[in-house]
Image (cartoon, rainbow, N blue to C red):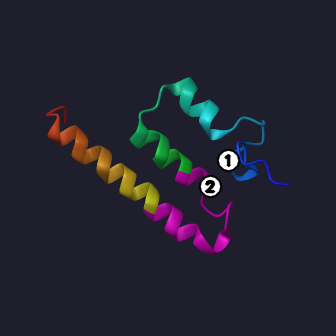
Amino acid sequence: MADVIHPAYYNSKSGRDVIEVAMDFGLNVFQFNTLKYLVRAGRKDPSKTLEDISKAEEYLERWKDYVKKEGRG
């Protein structure tokens, strides 16, 4: 049975998962979701690699919009 909490496609070769890395770096939701989709692109379902990359791009765009809205850019 697959580990729902720690799926293999989010783990690095060192055994650290993307959530641990995000927490170490104190990532915000935009950064975390971008990282998450980039890390799993091609690993969870190779047929959806481009879809995952597009999702990562979407979160980057959302982050850019947020930064602009806050006047921090």
Q: Which residues are magenta?
A: 37-54
The residue indicated by pointer 2 is 40
Prevailing secondary structure of the magenta residues: helix
Q: Quadrant of the N terminus?
A: bottom right
Give how far across and how far down residue 61 sits, in percent. 31, 53
| Side (left or right) of 61 relative to 15 | left
Is-magenta flag for residue 64?
Answer: no
Which residue sits at x=67%, y=67%? 45
Is residue 48 one of those drawn in magenta?
A: yes
Q: Amino acid at mark 2?
A: Arg
Relative horizontal placement of residue 68, taking residue 56 as reference (left or right): left
Tell me if mark 1 has few (under 14), some (14-19) or many (20+) residues whose alpha carbon lies within 10 angstroms of its own: many
Q: Residue at x 38, y 51 (%)?
A: 59
Figure quadrant of residue 18: top right
What percent of the width, then of the height, locates residue 2?
80, 53
Residue 41 horizontal/vertical position (percent): 60, 60
Q: Name which residue lies at 27% across and 46% down.
A: 64
Mark 1 vs 2: CB contact within 8 A: yes
Q: Which residue is mark 1?
A: 10
The x, y position of residue 9, in whole percent, is: 71, 53
